Amino acid sequence: MAKRKSLQETLDQPVPVVAIGASMGGLEALSVLLAELTPTTGFAFVYVQHPDPNAKHKISDILNEVSRIPVVEAGDLERILPNHLYVVPPGKDMEIIDGLLTHFARQQSTGIEEEVAHMPVDRFFVSLATRQKATGIGVILSGLDGDGTQGLKAIKEAGGITIAQDHTALYQGMPRSAIAEGVVDLVLPPHQIASELERLSQQPDIFQSTAQAEEGEESLPPDEELKPILTFLRKAVGVDFSQYKVTTIRRRIIRRMLLYKLETLKDYAQYLRQQPQEANLLYSDLLINVTSFFRDAEVMEYLKKVLFPRMIAENNEGEPLRIWVPACSTGQEAYSLAMLLMEVLGERASSMVIQIFATDLSESAIAKARLGSYSRSEIMDVSPRRLHRFFTKQDDQYRINKSIRDLCVFAPHNIFKDPPFSRVDLVSCRNLLIYLNGSLQRRALTMFHYGLNPRGYLLLGKSETVGSSASLFTPVEKAYKIFARKNDVARRASFELQPRTIEVSPAPPVSRRVSSARPPALPVNDLEQRIDALLLNQYVPASVVVNQDLDILSFRGSTALYLEHTQGRASLNLLKMARPSLSFELRNAVHKVLKSGQPVRKNGLEMKAGGTTHYVAIEAAPLESDSEDRLFLIVFQETSAPVAPETGPVKARNRRIKELEEELANVRRDMHSLIEEQEAGNEELQSANEEIVSSNEELQSINEELETSKEEIESTNEELLTINQELQVRNEQLSEAYEFAEAIFATLREATLVLDADLRVRSANSTFYEMFDVRREDVEGRLLYELNGRQWDSARLRERLAGVITQDIQIQGFEFMYVLPNGQEKVLLLNARRVVRQQRKEAILMAIEEITEHRRAQRLSQEREAWFHAIVDNSPALTWVASVDRRYTYLNRAWLNYTGRTLEEEVGQGWAQGIHPNDRVQYLATYHARFADRQPFTTEYRLLRSDGEYRWMLEQAQPTFSPDGVFNGYIGTCADVHLQKELNQELDRRVQQRTYELAEANTLLNQTEMIARIGSYERELASPTMLASDELYRLFGYKPHSVELTLNFIDAHTHPDDLAPTHAHLEQAMQDGLPFEYVRRIFRSDGQMRYLYVRGEIIRDGNGQPFKVVGFKQDITDVMLTQEKLRKSGEEFRTLVENTPDIITRWNKELKLLFANTAFEAKTGTPLSDLLGKTNQEMGQPDSIAVPYMDKLKQVFATGKPQEHYNSFPTPNGLTLYFSRMVPEPDSDGTVQSVLAIARDITQLQELTENLQAILDSSPAWIAYLKAVFENDNPDQVVDFRLAVCNHKFADLQQAPAQELIGLPVEQIASLLWREQTLERLKQIRLTGEPFYEEHSPTGDSEGWTAVSATRFDGGVVVTGLDITALKRAERQQDHWLEELRASNQSLNTLEELRQHIRQRGQFLRETSHDLRGNFGVISGAASLLTMVSSEEERAKMFEMLQRNMRQATRMLTQLLDYARLESGQETVQLTTFDVAQLIQNQSETVEPLVTEKGLWFRTEGTTPLLVEGDSLKIERIVQNLVLNAIKYTRQGGITVRWQGADSENQWTLMVEDTGPGIPEDVLESFRRPSGSPSDDSSRPASKAVSDNTGEGIGLSIVRQLCNLLSAQLEVESELGTGTVFRITWPRRYSAGSAD
């Protein structure tokens, strides 16, 4: 294997750079890529990512953890090294210059910032393409937006490789944009991208070929390997690239070779022939469209400020301004020029006609240009001002406004085949000529010269020039490559008038030999250069190089004698410069060379120059050239004058005559040739004239048709004008509606989204961005479910939105919960419907309304309503609520209890049924009348009570209104006034006794006051006398009205200490006007002191002046005495606390002592004053005592639940054990303010516990008491058990001291009990109270047994265990003896079975021998008959009989051998992996003739393939035996074989089903018994065990034994007259030794 060489070792070229661009999700993909990348690729890697504001770690630190190559953060002017990854810092833009990473300032935009696209990936990729050319590789990973698309396009145009991540990208925006643009060569997951980079690094030779192509000779024609490719491409797409620059073509082809892993151009040519579609891909590569808006800002500025104003000024009024943009790509150049013209013209734009013709070879590019829609990355060079003026944002695209699009006409066009546009004022052809060789450049420039107006201009790219066509154009501004048309040249454009689809004939081969007239470019010293210059100037004959038009291209030697400039316009035409006597001969000589291709020489030409006669010889020779133009070398040589021989005049005259005759003959020959050519030309012209005449007639006919069509078109045009006007009006209306809709969309208070059919966000209004605090670029173009941490990824929302698109179902009032980053929840109400946008694209308009406050208010209203219902339901008054429709909607519990009816029976109008019939009509009339005028009302009626009695009710009702005054209904209350009603009725009947009844009522009132011991009074302030009720007299111990109650009387009976306070209260009430109250001690007439509670109020007159006091006095002596008793009880409680032996303390949140009784003081031996305000540690207690106690206090404060604590404490009387219970004391708001702790001395109890422990330890069984742990102190909810008591035997089993086990949860001791079932079993025992007993081996060792019993006790469970191993051993010994006895009986049975088996085998052999003898007898008889039969038909029957019986005999012998091997145990299992389906298919082909012979069908059904492990040969024998047995006994129908993988992963099933006669039940029973059982007779010959119509066959015995050998389970189901099913279940995999 050849040793691998890196690229850097192979090439002395810049380090190949792999640029990786990504955004969101890119870091994960890059981590996968780096993990698969080796450190020896020789590539340098640069990672460019959009900045993440939430990033907490540097990207380089994260990637270093997974990368095998060094990862560093790129610095300014840092040289790139192979096998390194450079991370561009966030927020910085970089480019690569001469192998250095360089920072450059980011372009600061003006205007609206959100419209400025920042594309760091595009910028770096474009820089890489410019600097690295074909040694750059671009990779796009996960990310949003379309950043990187234009950069990949530039890399691909430069010859580099472009790769994008496939569907594994978390965010598809960046990869999908590049793929849709068609600039991606490979679409792969990250790990395969790494593999592809590894492969590319191993092909340095192809990279070197690309680099050499960059440096190659531009003028060289395609080599022999390249020509077949270009020829095939010309035939496939109709475009000849042979005259394009070889470097460009080679670079693009090598790039394709890299993609397909091809080594040579011949390989690629072969691939091109095998894959014809590759021609279109290569064609697309060669025509890659790289352009941008306002490319070369300085040039654009010159056009705007200088050239365009000049062109507009020079333009004739009324004539259009025409511009041609060849090779326009996707239209950015044409649109840029249109926008510049609009800016220059300003308000004059409407008065000038502008026509911009933009052409290109690529029809796909032209289609995109016509649409005029561009991504954000494509418009990043457009200023915000132009963006707002000339573009319209549509979803995530920016489209050129229609006014600009209407100026531009786009069309496919080949400037070398199609006629050029004419009368244009400007040709803008930038960066096309750099891809063409000299010949095509000249042709193109000639075309442009032809198409331009006399005052036209030509704009070329910054790397282009007019070159050899300088005679056609003159420079206007060299810095910006702007040229003006020359009008004094004779050259004319030539172009082919032929259909675009006609194949171009291949050009004749052109020799690569350079003309001899060109000196070799070899390095020489100065002397040699001087010698060459001297020779060229003085000794080279005068000569010129001319083209086919006789234009002089080059001079050699001194030509002044032969050529001179004529007066007038300057010209380099040979015939115009030559001496007149030489012109004809020069034209004639060139004509002959052009015709024959051979050099022509003419001697003895006489000419006059300067009055002197000279004799000249001229020679014309063809000159080979790389271009398509025919070139000729004309050599002038002066000869000496002819010397006349010294002869007489006659001879001289004869000689002269002879010369003239020869010259005349030559002229005649030339004339004859010219005449022939002229006659041939005339014939061609005649033929062409006839064709023209014919065509003229056809055109005349067509013209007439066109005239007719013109009239129709004019009529149609008028209709179209009318329709166009209507459409224009409609368009304006639509525009207004669209603008109106956009304005509404932008000003809506609700957040609004527009989603496309894929649920990607196309646009959103400002409310959405404000509500969710997101940016436009983070939202637009992304899936709705990806927004805001995937909070919108709801299955219900997905389903609803899918219904909107597919079924046009509107979403109304869909509630959605949204959580803000700060944890705050928002309740959103979603409404959505399907809309159709421009280009008939379906979209979803979704409005989002925040109803958080509404829902909060609704919940508050519901809570208040529930609160109201609770109050009303608990109110003793009967309450009802009626709605505006006058129907009862609510009745409280008191009403329902009173009437004894349910709410369903009462609501609506059901309540009226309970009103007395005599009162119902009157009540309903009042009810409806008050509803009509919405006034309060009070009425009385009789209502049926639950006991069947009608009771009088007093009903009061009030109308209810909403806050905005809307009537909501009525609310009413009812009181049982049956008693009052009866009293009133009684009063009505006894009107004459009214006075008496009033007195009686007054008495009743007095009695009421007397019962309540309340006396009322009133007194005018100006009078000392008060008006008092009878009870007030009694309060003072007097009979009513027996004394005069005055102010002095009251004061005289008042305790002296209370006089001043009572007067002060009265004066204060007169000042502030508020009610007053106080307690006054009085002395009754009997001297008894009573406490009176006094409450009163000052009554003021109309002027606001106090004039009366009213109030009441209540005897509260009993209350005061009770309070005194409570005070005494408190003192007694304090005495009890101080004298109790229990220690009582109270602690605050700082764990400091607030209160302690004297027992605590005695416990500590320290005065209480020194202890208050201190913690246990501050009191000097040891940490071993203080810290646990304080921890318990903390738990009480933290949980609010009581805690228990045990601790020992050194007291003055010695070490004492205490049990403490700590109880929380909550405040009114539920928070624990303090903890009350009570500690009791349990030293004696501990001694009793130790005695009990000693008793437990003496038990031979282990004992444990498990105490239940309750949830929230609820005894019905047991959550755990904890060990409370255990003996030493239990502790020994747990291998831990008993003290450490106490308090452990049950899960930590479950291994001794019932493991994971322990907790549930203990809960069950505690719940049911039923004892439990079980014997088991806790350790799983059969040698150790324990009897465990459990019983409920005191809310817990007592568990005891006893070792019963000895008892179990005794039982086991007994079982062993019984087993030996059974084995003896089994041996006796086996002997009997063996005898039976021997008898059956003998019978089996006899019957088998009989069958074989029968078969051989038939064979013998048939063989003897063969010699006797005479016809071929009878002989065929005999042969068939022989074959059938031979097959039967062979099959029976094979079965006997199988049976014998199985019986003797000689069969072994050979495990292999095989396909069950293939095995059964092979078997099917074997038995097909037998099945066909009997007229049966044979079917196979099963999983294909089904790979299993097993002995394929034995399984094949099983299948064969079952199938042959089925064929043998099946008379009609057929056989089905099925196989499948069973439910269990390690099993598979085979079924053979036939439609035969079936097997009798007794045979089935014997067959189903286990092999070797007492009644097993499966080894019997099946031929006799089963009748001929039902037989089992010997094969089935073999099947059964083979199944046992292979650990398979055989099942048989059969029904007489229906058929039999054999089902075998096999292991799919055998464990070691399982099939031995």
Image (cartoon, rainbow, N blue to C red):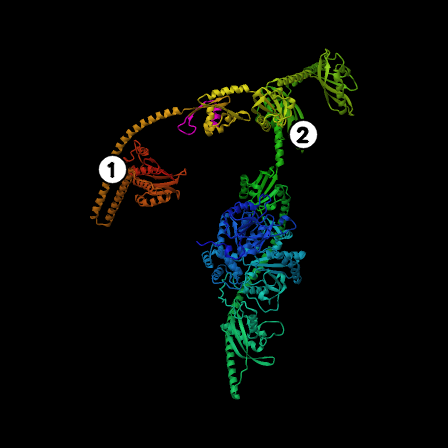
The one of 1066 and 345 positioned closer to us in this rendering = 1066
Amino acid found under the numbered disc labelled 2: Asp
In the image, taking residue 892 as reference, residue 226 lies left or right, namely: left
The one of 912 and 1518 positioned closer to us in this rendering = 1518
In the image, taking residue 1142 as reference, residue 1457 lies left or right, namely: left
Q: CA distance from mark 1 to mark 2?
A: 117 Å
Q: Is residue 191 above or below residue 571?
A: above
Tag shown at residue 933: 2
Was residue 1341 drawn as part of the magenta stretch in this picture? yes
In the image, taking residue 727 as reference, residue 202 lies left or right, namely: left
Magenta residue span: 1318-1345
For mark 1, does the 10 Å Cα neighbourhood hold few (<14), some (14 to 19), or many (20 or more) residues? Answer: some
Was residue 379 drawn as part of the magenta stretch in this picture? no
Task: Give the percent coordinates (x, y) of residue 457.
Answer: 62, 63
Among all residues in the image, which is located at the extreme right? 1022
Please tell me whether mark 1 or mark 2 is closer to you in this view: 1
Total labels drawn: 2
Query: Would you say residue 1344 is visible in this rendering?
Result: yes
Among all residues in the image, which is located at the extreme top? 1086
Classify residue 1187 by image quadrant: top right
Task: Give the percent coordinates (x, y) of residue 137.
Answer: 53, 53
